[in-house]
């Protein structure tokens, strides 16, 4: 099965590691990648980010990218992943959509990140006060009608949100946000053939987390 991902990498572009190459800068373990993310978030939350030189590495970035984590985050303007994790250009492979859920196009992007670019960690990142999750709760509980293409988005969030509603939690929005992250972590872990295979081989880990807008802190769930 490992051949499938390698073959796809060849078809999509440059393989992660050609024979004779030095290991890529992002050839680290999923756990190390997670530690790097959480250390960056601790700096951000403490308002003590690393000094940034955006010109440094520009030339190297022309020919390659070596992101060490993929982040599936909400489109909400308050949670820019590079800032929240105190990272620079080329560090994170970011996919954003309101409600941070996986569909086939977003999955394809994440597959590219891990199979071709060698990203070892995928994080689904929900956040406090998510309008997309809140709207989905109102659709389910009150039959709210959403305009434009939003009904399709609410439909995508329904499995996790419904699970939270069924559990009758004290804080439904928080619980629904968490369950939505869990549902999409599970979907990614089971996403055959590419991500599921990389997860099974231990090369890639999928984790879920929630960002608290009030504190700036990311908590694993
Ligand atoms: Zn949101």
Image (tube, grey):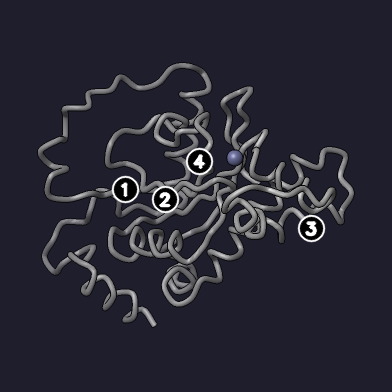
Which residue is label 1 attached to? 67
* Residue under the point 22% across and 53% down: 24
Measured as percent of width and height from the top left, residue 150 is found at 61, 51
Badge 4 density bin: few <14, some 14–19, many ≥20, Cα 10 Å: some
Secondary structure of residue under mark 2: strand
Secondary structure of residue under mark 4: loop
Which residue is label 3 attached to? 163
Front of the two marks 4 and 2: 4
Which residue is label 2 attached to? 70
Label 3 or label 2, whichever comes before in sequence order: 2
From the Cβ of disc 2, is ligand 1 less than 8 Å away?
A: no
Which residue is label 4 attached to? 75
Label 1 or label 4, whichever comes before in sequence order: 1
Left or right: 143 in relation to 7 = right
Secondary structure of residue under mark 1: loop
Front of the two marks 1 and 3: 3
Label 1 or label 3, whichever comes before in sequence order: 1
* On screen, residue 48 above or below 87: above
Front of the two marks 1 and 4: 4
Whether the residues at callouts 3 and 2 have beta carbons within 8 Å, the answer is no
Measured as percent of width and height from the top left, residue 111 is found at 39, 64
- Quadrant field for ligand 1: top right
Whether the residues at callouts 2 and 1 have beta carbons within 8 Å, the answer is yes
Label 4 or label 2, whichever comes before in sequence order: 2
* Residue under the point 47% across and 50% down: 31
Question: Mark 4 and mark 2: span between their CA atoms?
Answer: 15 Å
């Amino acid at each position: 099965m490992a051949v499938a991902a390698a073959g796809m990498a060849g078809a999509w572009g440059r393989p992660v590691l050609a024979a004779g190459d030095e290991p890529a800068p992002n050839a680290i373990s999923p756990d190390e990648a997670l530690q790097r993310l959480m250390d960056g978030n601790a700096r951000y939350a403490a308002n003590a980010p690393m000094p940034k030189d955006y010109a440094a590495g520009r030339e190297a970035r022309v020919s390659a990218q070596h992101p060490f984590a993929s982040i599936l985050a909400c489109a909400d303007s308050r949670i820019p992943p590079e800032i929240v994790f105190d990272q620079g250009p080329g560090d994170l492979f970011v996919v954003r959509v309101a409600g941070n859920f996986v569909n086939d196009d977003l999955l394809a992007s994440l597959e590219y990140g891990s199979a071709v670019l060698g990203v070892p960690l995928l994080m689904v990142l929900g956040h406090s006060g998510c309008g997309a999750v809140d709207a989905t709760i109102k659709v389910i509980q009150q039959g709210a009608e959403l305009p434009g293409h939003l009904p399709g988005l609410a439909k995508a969030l329904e499995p996790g949100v419904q699970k939270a509603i069924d559990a009758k939690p004290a804080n439904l929005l928080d619980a629904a946000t968490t369950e939505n992250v869990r549902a999409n972590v599970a979907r990614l872990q089971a996403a055959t053939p590419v991500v599921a295979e990389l997860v099974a081989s231990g090369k890639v880990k999928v984790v879920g987390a929630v960002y608290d807008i009030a504190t700036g802190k990311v908590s694993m769930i």
